[in-house]
Image (cartoon, rainbow, N blue to C red):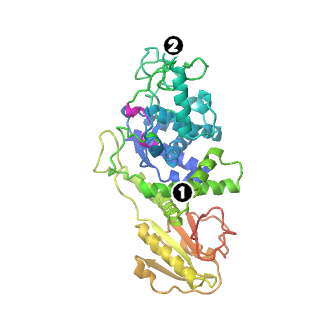
Amino acid sequence: MDRDRAAIEKFQAAVARLCLERPYFATAALSLRPVPVPPEAGIALAAVGDDWRVYIAPAFARLGVVEAAAVLQHELEHLLRDHASRLRSVDPHILANMAADMEINDDLVRSWPAARWDQLNPVTPGKFGLPEGLTAEEYVSLLRKQQKDASGQSQTGRTNQVGQASPSGQPGQPQSGQPGQSGQPEKSAGAGQDKKAGQQTGQSGRGPSGKPSPPGGDGNTAAPQEGMDRFEGSGATGRRGPWELPQDAEPKGLSGHGAEAVRLATAKAILEEAGRQRGTVPSGLTKWARRQLSGRQVNWSDILRAYISQALDLVASAGDERSYARLSRRQIPGILLPGSAQPEPIVAVVLDTSASMGEMGVSQAVAQIASILAQTDASVYVLATDAAVHEVRRVFDERDLSAEFPGGGGTEMSVGVEQALKLTPRPDLVIVMTDGYTDWPSVRPPVPVVVCLVGRYTRAGVPDWAKVVEVK
């Protein structure tokens, strides 16, 4: 359907813009699974499930690319910050959603200065007279206090949760899918009318302090509506919306171990970027990344798995793009699901067999190749390389790794990368297993490159365009 195609194309453009401007989000952004939904689903722009499916409404396709990328980052941060498990027990639902939005949006608005925030109207701590930089749990506590303080004051009018007047006096419906908003029906551009309810918009509901009243209080705001189609989904609050797909439906989502691997990889990338370019990463994200990694031993295999999944998702997305011409046999009423027509991805592993690696380093690298074989259904080729490529071997299982790989001379991994790119067909991902004592290609390769440092390694000289995993 043209409507669903437009939503998918805008999603892909937003992912590309987000990865370009925020490269540390690349692993996470490429792990999202888009699902177009019809207008009757009640999602204004986008909503997210705790399984990393993002539900795209038709109105999302009409956003500018910058606005779409900002919306996508907002939904992505719900998942990275694991709001689903953190806020599942918070009641009412709108309170959880607003607190989660505040944790995200204080940084988000400043980090996208070119976005038209007048169109998106995000919930931010400042709109409620609250300090920035707090956690969602802290915002829940402060909003509850505001609610309690407002409960004894006379009711002079009713508004919805985003500070818009509801002349009928009935509970307003929170928005969903926009940064900081939870699910209001789409509005006509410039008309100031809610298409579904006919409510006037654009008037601020204020409490006695002049600030928007907290949800559920007896001040100048309506009690929140509990309809789950009016929230940003289980990825934001832990409660499923009726538009969320069953777990076994296509496209498959991400959960458990895979989701945690993506969080770890993203946190690591954020701190690396903050170390290279001070002041370019929002402080809230840096704090989150430090909390994510603080006091825990990062499992390098999780990071490697996330990087492999990210790179091979590029191939999968190409298959998804073509597969809309052939729909899945399993369909959800009102939702267009793509069929499965994905090409087989190809992984080239450049194995450093130089003298500096030693027998132990090569053995450690071969063990990681065995792990890669277990992680993916891709076709895997190993290029034994020191100062030259001595062998190109296709490997199917651990038995193909038992024969010794030739080498023992100098080190020139750039030769291995160049040879890998000449394979036919060209690989979708290049992984370099090395101790790092080597030269690198002077030009960024046209495919993703992951450098897996093994043995007594060094990071010095590893190019910025490579993803790095340190095997400890």
Task: Tell me which label, 1 or 2, sits earlier in the chain.
Answer: 2
Which secondary structure, mark 1? helix
Which residue is tagged 1? 264
Report the span colored magenta: 227-235
The three-letter amino acid code for the residue at tag 1 is: Leu
Q: CA distance from mark 1 to mark 2?
A: 48 Å
Q: Is residue 396 magenta?
A: no
**Can see residue 112?**
yes
Which residue is tagged 2? 154
Image vertical order of residue 179 relative to residue 52, above or below: above
Q: Is residue 229 magenta?
A: yes
Q: Nearer the viewer, mark 1 or mark 2?
A: 2
Which secondary structure, mark 2? loop
Image vertical order of residue 323 relative to residue 332, above or below: below
Residue at the extreme left: 329
Horizontal and vertical percent for residue 440?
Answer: 65, 71
For residue 207, which quarter of the picture?
A: top right
Horizontal and vertical percent for residue 160?
Answer: 48, 23
Viewport quadrant of the N terminus: top left
Mark seen at residue 345? none
Mark 2 crowdedness (10 Å alpha carbons): few <14, some 14-19, many ≥20: few
User: Toward the viewer: 17 or 236?
Assistant: 236
